[in-house]
Image: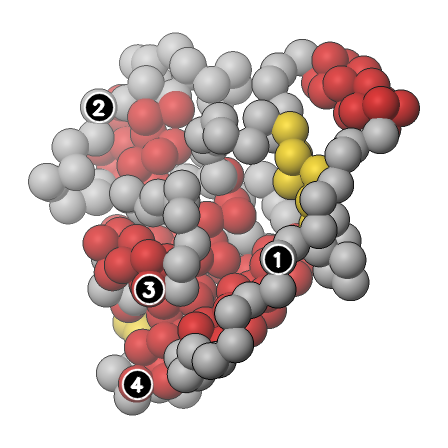
Amino acid sequence: MHFPVNLLTALFLLCATQAIAQKPKASKPAAPQPTFTVPVRLEQELLRLSSLSGGKVGICATHIESGKTIVQNGKEPFPMASSYKVAIATQLLTRVDSGSVTLDQLVPITKNDLHPGSGMLSDRFDWPNSTSPGLSLSVRSLLELMLLISDNSATDICLRLAGGPASVNACMKRLGVEGLQVNRPTAWLIADCVGIPMDMNQPWSPARYDSLAKLNTPKCGKPVT
């Protein structure tokens, strides 16, 4: 689940949306969006490519200059995968703007902050058997790890610094972003994917995850370590 270029592009778009949302509304009514009918040839090609994927594909593409939009399965909810990290970054940067958090603020990282999946923080500790001491990283570094290499451990720390899932969802609502939901950290998403019953009301435990992972058959197709 690595989408660094798309993540950064989406981050800039969401930040721009936030800046626009904070400006007073213009007195003139918004210009009507041009109607656009998807060419049959393009629609057929999208369907052909979708059928090759082996699953259901959702597509939404907008031509910025004209406002023309192409949508396929636009009302279907899809798992966000690592793209939900953009929403987390947006709320965290909102807290930076308000002064609640600073980019240079150092955040202590312990072994319990090391979560499975993509990234490099877990490798730094040789998770889960390392006895290496903890370290501290700046909020800026954690954001970079989350957005540039899709580090899951950094993501869950950023989610905590952002105020948790409810704060991220509230931020998206303020920005007018609908149909998007961040409801748990990546560690619990992955645990659910591989069939591990990790209670959200209990603190994360790498040792518990590691022991339960050996007893469960993944629901998502392959083990995640």
Residue 197 drawn at (x, y percent)? 22, 23
Q: What is the number of the mark on residue 32?
A: 1
Residue that label 2 marks: 197
Provide residue 124's location: percent of width, then percent of height: 48, 57
In the drawing, what numbered circle is on residue 174? Answer: 3
Q: Which residue is mark 4?
A: 98
The tag earlier along the polypeptide, 2 or 4, is 4
- Give the mark toward the camera: 3 or 2: 3
Mark 4 is on which residue type?
Answer: Ser
Q: Nearer the viewer, residue 220 or 162?
A: 162
Q: Type of residue at label 1?
A: Pro
- Quadrant (top left/top right/bottom left/bottom right) for the N terminus: top right
Rendered position, 124 above or below 152: below
In this rendering, is residue 93 above or below 207? Answer: below
Identify the residue shown where x is 48% and y is 26%: 76
Q: Is residue 60 toward the left or the right of residue 137 in the image?
A: right
The answer to whether residue 125 shows anywhere in this view is no
Looking at the rendered structure, the kind of residue marked 3 is Arg
